[in-house]
Image (tube, coloured by chain):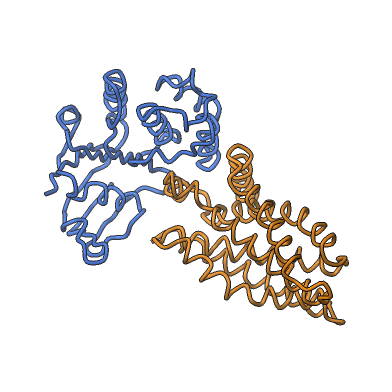
């Protein structure tokens, strides 16, 4: 177990270092999420309800995550490094864990900017919304990283990732919006936690079959 | 160490490797030759476990961590330095005394001076040397090398020959080359693909 965590940690550190050097993903995510919120700010009527604006927050988070996920395996694909990682004797799911941790870190940083910006443009955010966002992030990154690896192997990868990811992200939007708006927000947070538990296990177990023939 | 019986591979309708039979015993050195498109790289990828044959039987008696693979691509991150790349692979391959081994290989392949530069700034020849370091890092039992002399200058080729001379005594090697003249003197067998 210690070796597994050490491998996953080394791979996540590598992804964070790559981003620190190349600055390919995070600045784009930050710019995108702020731009989307500004566009929504002008697109929504002045008297729009908090319900409508909170829905748009989830749309912004989902598409920002999609932007990051689309770049998750770019370095491996362009430089063929995935073959090198796959041939290493470490458990292949450690590659997935490393990518999830790195993608999660980028998404959290984007949200650290996005949530105050949302509060500034639209309406204040409560603790249940923040909890919902945190739970949703885990599901988004778990499922999205698996699908990004699948899409990276294909030819129409830019098209494939959203087509695969968005249908699977619908429960996240349902749970996220529900946790922000419903009176019984605990039920929706529980739903998000269940989604995370199921899809983390599924994606972790399936990753090996995605990166090998 | 490797036994292939009528191993073939297709990609959709395209036949990438015609059925091929060969045996590579432990300690052997098999040179795979053939023109472009004859399936050399496909055969090596099959032996490395990166592809599965469409038909035939392929038996490779080497564990994943005991296989060193040199591909067309150097399989390194361009935004990392040579040391950072080899250190990452060293961790994943659980190389004992990793730092010493990395330093020794970089020194031996003439990359010590450039060890702190990002590999994106390396020439093609330097990347090939680094790829050789990566393939040898964990001291594998079975080495699968795809065009190892690619992009190497005269000094690099001499270095490679010295390495192969040494490796063939203790290791099993499967090497693909479209100009195998310099490798033939090491070889214990030759497989010509058409």
Residue drawn at 17 percent across, 49 percent down? B38
Whether A126 is drawn above or below B105: the answer is below
Whether B98 is drawn above or below B67: the answer is above
Depth order, front residue of B163/A186: A186
Q: Position of residue A12 (x, y in %)?
A: 62, 47
| Apparent side of residue B3 relative to residue A53 in the rendered image (left or right) | left
Q: Position of residue A100 (x, y in %)?
A: 62, 56
Whether A113 is drawn above or below B103: the answer is below
Whether A164 is drawn above or below B105: the answer is below
The color chain B is rendered in: blue
| Apparent side of residue A35 relative to residue B36 in the rendered image (left or right) | right
| Apparent side of residue B138 relative to residue A169 in the rendered image (left or right) | left
Depth order, front residue of B102/B125: B125
Residue drawn at 59 percent across, 45 percent down? A15
Depth order, front residue of A112/B140: A112
The color chain A is rendered in: orange
Numbered marks: total: 0
Q: Position of residue B100 (x, y in %)?
A: 53, 24
Q: Name the quadrant containing residue A191.
A: bottom right
Residue drawn at 53 percent across, 40 percent down? B94
């Amino acid at each position: 177990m210690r070796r597994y965590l050490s491998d996953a940690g080394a791979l996540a550190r590598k992804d964070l270092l790559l981003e620190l050097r190349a600055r390919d993903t995070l600045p784009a995510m930050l710019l995108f999420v702020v731009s989307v919120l500004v566009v929504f700010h002008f697109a929504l009527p002045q008297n729009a309800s908090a319900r409508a604006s909170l829905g748009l927050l989830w749309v912004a988070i989902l598409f920002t995550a999609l932007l990051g996920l689309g770049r998750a395996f770019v370095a491996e694909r362009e430089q063929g490094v995935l073959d090198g990682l796959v041939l290493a004797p470490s458990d292949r799911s450690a590659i997935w864990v490393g990518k999830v941790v790195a993608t999660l870190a980028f998404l959290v940083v984007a949200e650290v900017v996005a949530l105050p910006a949302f509060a500034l443009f639209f309406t204040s955010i409560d603790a249940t919304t923040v909890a919902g966002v945190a739970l949703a992030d885990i599901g988004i990154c778990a499922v999205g990283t698996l699908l990004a690896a699948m899409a990276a192997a294909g030819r129409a990868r830019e098209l494939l990732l959203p087509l695969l990811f968005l249908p699977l992200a619908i429960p996240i939007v349902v749970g996220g919006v529900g946790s922000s708006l419903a009176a019984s927000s605990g039920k929706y947070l529980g739903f998000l936690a269940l989604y995370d538990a199921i899809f983390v296990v599924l994606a972790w177990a399936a990753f090996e079959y995605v990166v090998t023939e | 160490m490797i036994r292939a019986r009528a191993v073939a591979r297709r990609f959709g309708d395209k036949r990438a490797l015609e059925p091929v039979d060969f045996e590579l015993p432990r300690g052997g050195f098999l040179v795979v030759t053939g023109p472009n498109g004859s399936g050399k790289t496909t055969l090596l990828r099959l032996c490395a476990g990166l592809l599965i044959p469409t038909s035939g039987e392929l038996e490779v008696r080497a564990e994943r961590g005991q296989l060193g693979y040199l591909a067309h691509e150097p399989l390194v991150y361009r935004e990392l330095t040579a040391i950072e790349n080899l250190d990452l692979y060293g961790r994943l391959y659980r190389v004992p005394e990793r730092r010493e081994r990395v330093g020794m290989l970089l020194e031996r392949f003439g990359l010590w001076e450039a060890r702190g530069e990002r590999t994106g700034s390396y020439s093609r020849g330097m990347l090939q040397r680094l790829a050789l370091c990566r393939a040898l890092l964990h001291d594998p039992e079975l080495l699968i090398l795809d065009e190892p002399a690619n992009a190497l200058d005269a000094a690099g080729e001499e270095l490679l020959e010295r390495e192969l001379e040494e490796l063939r005594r203790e290791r099993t090697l499967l090497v693909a080359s479209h100009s195998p003249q310099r490798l033939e003197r090491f070889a214990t067998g030759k497989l010509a693909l058409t």
